[in-house]
Amino acid sequence: MQHPPENPPTAAKIRLGRKLFLDRRLSRNGTLSCAMCHVPEQGFTVNELRTAVGFEGRSLRRNAPTLLNVAHAGPLFHDGREPALEMQPFDVFLNPDEMAAPSLGAVVAAVAALPDYTPLFRSAFGAPPGVERIGAALATYLRSLVSGGSSFDRWRYGGEAVALGPAARRGFVLFAGRAGCAACHVVGERHALFTDNRFHDTGVAWQQTVNRRSGIEGVAVELAPDVTTVLPHATVASVGTPPRADLGRYEVTGDPADRWRIRTPTLRNVALTAPYMHDGSFSSLREVVEFYDRGAYPHEGLDPAIRPLGLGKGDREDLVEFLQSLTGENTDELVRDARSETVGDPGD
């Protein structure tokens, strides 16, 4: 991980960025913070909902990606529309469905109006709040959310032969071999980001479009273990304007070849970050493994690496066991650090 030379990390910047991340007073109506869509206790995402709740209770269009190890991700967002972590927060601040600030100047004014920030900006930058300084502080804090030292890391890179159980080891052999997962979720000889940071059509965004056109779109709801039903969209409608079809990377580039392509997410800490896929359409790792085992949603444009795998039940269970071994050893510490900051309540 490299920090930009113009924004070297300091403890003062991290503390300031952490406070900005948690502060609901910075949204237009004083009710939302970054941490309400990226909840520290929920893997820095939202576990209860397919997509998070935004401004005035609106349903957001995409699943909130985890911020754990975001320092190694890029470009940012599911469609890769933002190349710089220093600028990424302003997409959220200005999005009318998220924190809904009317302008960059309004964001700066909101921060400057809060006297508890004056000494923090002085300590971190020797200057008052500004667009670049707000972005730099938030980016510095986000780069501190590094989580490694998983059971897999200790086994593969630390030489601890007993750190990974037999099922997880079998799962890794499948992951790196016959299942082909490592083609996109890359595992190197010396380190593993578990992403190629590239864009692929897995069929999920395409299927959303097909369902929307045919009027059969629904939401899968697990009623009990192994008992699932699909409720029609009208039963669990989104709040606010119905989301438009998701064309993925195409919405950024305008290149037809990028239709329905979504950035490969990291699999580190994936056991903590349900629901899965960019639309939150799968609630468990088992569902994700079964989806890829059956070859996703076949269509023209589907990534050529995706094909039916023919896995047995034991194979699928081993893959899930492997994925559960990717949780970092310091995630609880990162949660405690996030919650150590005192932030004013709305109206203060």
Image (tube, rainbow, N blue to C red):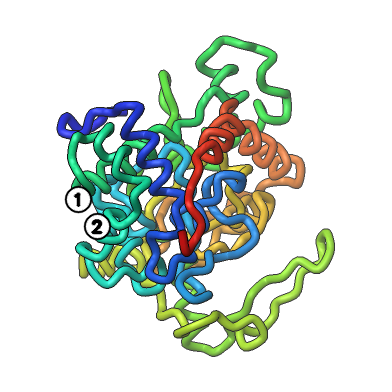
Residue to which mark 2 is pinned: 108
Taking the spot 41% from the left edge, 68% from the top edge, the residue there is 98
Percent x, y of residue 125: 21, 35
Is disc 1 placed on a helix, strand or loop? loop
Query: Is 136 drawn above or below residue 300 in the view shown?
Result: above
Quadrant housing residue 155 = top right
Q: Is residue 157 visible?
A: yes
Name the foreground residue: 63 vs 176: 63
Crowding near the residue tagged with mark 1, few <14, some 14–19, many ≥20 C-alpha atoms within 10 Å: some
Percent x, y of residue 276: 56, 56
Percent x, y of residue 222: 76, 66
Tell whether label 1 touches label 2 (CB within 8 Å). Answer: yes
Q: Does 332 sit left or right of 245 as displayed? A: right
Residue to which mark 1 is pinned: 130
Distance from disc 2 to disc 1, alpha carbons, whole Å, reads 6 Å
Amino acid carrying label 1: it is: Gly
Percent x, y of residue 115: 34, 49
Q: First in sequence: mark 2 or mark 1?
A: 2
Crowding near the residue tagged with mark 2, few <14, some 14–19, many ≥20 C-alpha atoms within 10 Å: some
Is disc 2 placed on a helix, strand or loop? helix
Q: How many marks?
A: 2
Name the foreground residue: 139 vs 222: 139
